[in-house]
Amino acid sequence: MGEDTLDPVIHTQARLRIMTTLTALPDGDRLTFTKLQSLLDASAGNLSTHLRRLEDAGYVQVVKTHQGRIPSTQVGVTRTGRRAFEDYVAHLRTLLTPPTDPAEAQEER
Amino acid sequence: MVEDTPLDPAASAALIAEQRAKVEAAVDVDGRILFGAWGVAWLLGFGLVWLVAVDRLQMSAGAAMVTFIASLAGAGAVTAWHLTVKSRGVRGTSARQGAMYGWSWFLSFGVVAALGVALDRAGAGEEAMGVAMMVSSLLVVGALYMAGGAIWEERIQWALGAWICVSTIAAALVGSPHMYLVMCIAGGGGMVVAAAAEAVRRRSRARASDG
């Protein structure tokens, strides 16, 4: 990955929102697929596609269980995912930090 | 959710802030609602029991007790509803922690109920029963609030638990019937103050994140 490119696995509107949602929860917490869907206003198909991409990268873990007889899919961020998100945010911050030339920084605002 | 729209860094930062706020609001357990509901229940319930105990209000002791229990049940229903809504769809560590904490309340009050049965069998009089039931119930509330405050690092909840313990010590020393007035004002009032403190804390935090 180059210096200026943000992690492409996270850097799309859909996946950034998924990662933000999951990392906003305390360590060890998961959301049901339905809850995640409602927090993102996403369609099930769209969400599944992006989750698969994140799962392939090792950023999220999708657990399929049963609550009694009802199947339940739960999604949580992995340690790798949390670290990747923190790196992404840190990288974002450096990109957003005003340039060293104060005049240029003024112009940006 | 829009399919892969290109993002610039500023848009990414805005999206993170917006989504994080949305998630936090969805799982946020609101002390204003919980403390407020219990505060009102205690003010009404203990107040009524005291008024009846000192003959300022014409009502049978049984009817007063039923009203007292009904007001507590109302606050309990508000609590259960709020916690159910906020924990819906959340699994894992928080859910397990919440379940253990919930069972702690349930079992502790089981012990209080058992104490009542045991005292009754041992021939305790009405006044002794009243004192034992109130003090042991408040011990559970105060202790579990302090424990909850410590677990979730919520200062207001911890302070409220500590305040309830202090109020209960005072009430126990005052004895029947004015112990009910102590719990009405100090206990119920303390709950309302905690709800107000929570409101202030939230407002100052919101202002800090706006700035």
Image: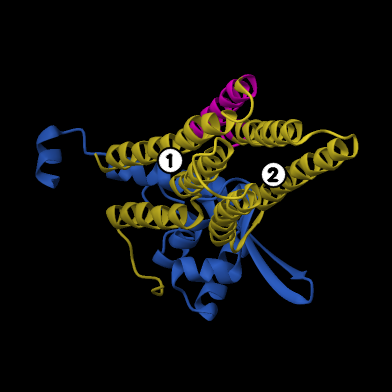
Chain colours: A blue, B yellow
| Disc 2 crowd, CA 10 A, few/some/many (<14, 14-19, 20+) | some
- B194 left or right, relative to A4: right
Q: What residue span does the magenta drawing correspond to? A: B149-173
Residue drawn at x 62%, y 51% as measured from the top left: B69
Distance (Cα) linking label 1 and label 2: 21 Å
Residue drawn at x 9%, y 44% as measured from the top left: A107
Say above or below: B32 vs A76: above
- Residue type at mark 2 is Tyr
Residue drawn at x 67%, y 35% as measured from the top left: B134
- Is residue B81 or residue A97 the one in the foreground? B81
Q: From the image, tell me which residue sits under label 2.
A: B101
Q: Quadrant of the N terminus of chain B?
A: bottom left
Say above or below: A43 vs B193: below
Q: Where's residue B6, x and y in %?
A: 33, 66
Quick check: do tags 1 and 2 share a chain? yes
Tag 2's secondary structure?
Answer: helix
Q: From the image, tell me which residue sits under label 1.
A: B195
Q: Quadrant of the C terminus of chain B?
A: top left
- Residue type at mark 1 is Ala
Is residue A39 something that shows in the picture?
Answer: yes
Where residue A49 sits, quadrant-wise, is bottom right
Q: Chain of mark 1?
A: B
Q: Where's residue B92, x and y in %?
A: 68, 53
Q: Nearer the N terminus, badge 1 or badge 2?
A: 2
- Is residue B188 or residue B191 the one in the foreground? B188
The secondary structure that most of the magenta stretch takes on is helix
Is residue A52 something that shows in the picture?
Answer: no
